[in-house]
Amino acid sequence: MTSPLGRPLLIVNQQAGRRKVEAVVRRLEGALAGHGMDYDVCTTGGPGHASHLARERLEEGGRFLVAVGGDGTVHEVVNGMFVDGRTIVPQPVLGVVAAGSGCDFVRTFGLPTAPAEAAARLAGAETRSLDLARIGYVDAHGSSRTRHFANIAEAGLGGSTAARAGGLPRLLGPSRYFFAFWATLPSYHPGTMRIEVDGEVAHEGRTVNVVVANGRFFGGGMHISPKSDPSDGTLELLVFTGRKTDSFTMLPKVYRGRHVPHPSILELRGRCIRLESEQPFSIEADGEILGTTPATVEVLPSPVRLKV
């Protein structure tokens, strides 16, 4: 049986935690077979391969892609949907099955993490609109680059933390970010940043971290942006301006989404955000290390459909 959305391609990232992913895929394939659903499956061979597989499938006329892995897998699949700033096919469909080291993206939508439940959703016809974001930044060689992201991007302490988390053992799972945060905090030095939102200056001064959010969760379950709606055509912006020591009292509240409102957090919303700083701020998106400021982030209203 073919899905109403076409024959899906499961793009599996075993680097997200080999044994865990293999177990998830076995159960997922068994459940899909139980639904009589036809599908194809490819396993990634390294960084960037998921993007290549996604792009190849869409260029062949496919439409339905399923990222099986963590937030990094979703990030790569989403980027594979675009060529020259546009989706390869109109309204491609993105499915996500969480597997491996962690997937905060699914938390915003309440998507099931159990393979059997995920298979039942994939076999159905229901989808919803999904905004994405495009970010322009400076890479390690000083060149301008552009990427897309589905969930959240950060500049500052969060970017430096993500870089450190990438070097920690994957067996730590979602807690890698937690350990990396406390390891990064003592030596991190805040800087001065100028932030424009939709062409108007919204902040200019001391900045510890900037979060640009399409989704609500990141960092292994932190409810960082409770007001985010990834289908409203806007991005939420949280600018942390306080002392580093605020983290000791604020972090537990972040997991519950109770950190805002707060005197040292500036909450903004917009469609186009410009970040400029005297010293480069490290940037990450969907947990992937990109580069540094200056950066521009713009929302892309509903270029894809999300399988729910």
Image (spheres, rainbow, N blue to C red):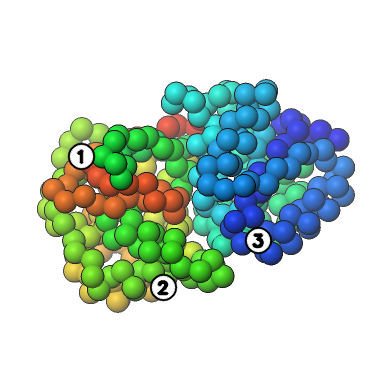
Compare marks 2 and 1 and give the one earlier in the sequence.
2
Query: Label 1 is placed on what type of residue?
Result: Glu
Q: Residues within 10 Å of mark 2 (few under 14, many from 20)?
A: some
Compare marks 2 and 3 and give the one earlier in the sequence.
3
* SS state under label 1: strand
Residue at mark 3 to residue at mark 1: CA–CA distance: 42 Å
Percent coordinates x, y for residue 260 in the rendering: 32, 62
Q: Nearer the viewer, residue 32 or 124?
A: 32
| Location of residue 148 by image quarter | top left
Which residue is at 39% across, 69% downward? 180
Compare marks 3 and 1 and give the one earlier in the sequence.
3
**From the viewer's perspective, is the residue at label 2 or at label 1 nearer?**
2
Q: Is residue 122 visible?
A: yes
Percent coordinates x, y for residue 200 in the rendering: 18, 36
Residue 18 numbered mark, or none: 3
Which residue is at 30% across, 76% downward? 248
Confirm or deny contact between disc 3 and disc 1 (CB under 8 A): no
Percent coordinates x, y for residue 232 in the rendering: 44, 38
What residue would you read off at disc 1? 196
Query: Label 3 is placed on what type of residue?
Result: Arg
Confirm or deny contact between disc 2 and disc 1 (CB under 8 A): no
* SS state under label 2: helix
Percent coordinates x, y for residue 199 in the rendering: 20, 32
Which residue is at 37% across, 59% downward? 163
Q: Residues within 10 Å of mark 1 (few under 14, many from 20)?
A: some
**From the viewer's perspective, is the residue at label 2 or at label 3 nearer?**
3
Quadrant containing the N terminus is top right
| Location of residue 124 by image quarter | top right
Which residue is at 52% across, 26% downward? 87
What residue would you read off at disc 2? 179
Q: Is residue 280 left or right of residue 79?
A: left
Q: How many marks?
A: 3
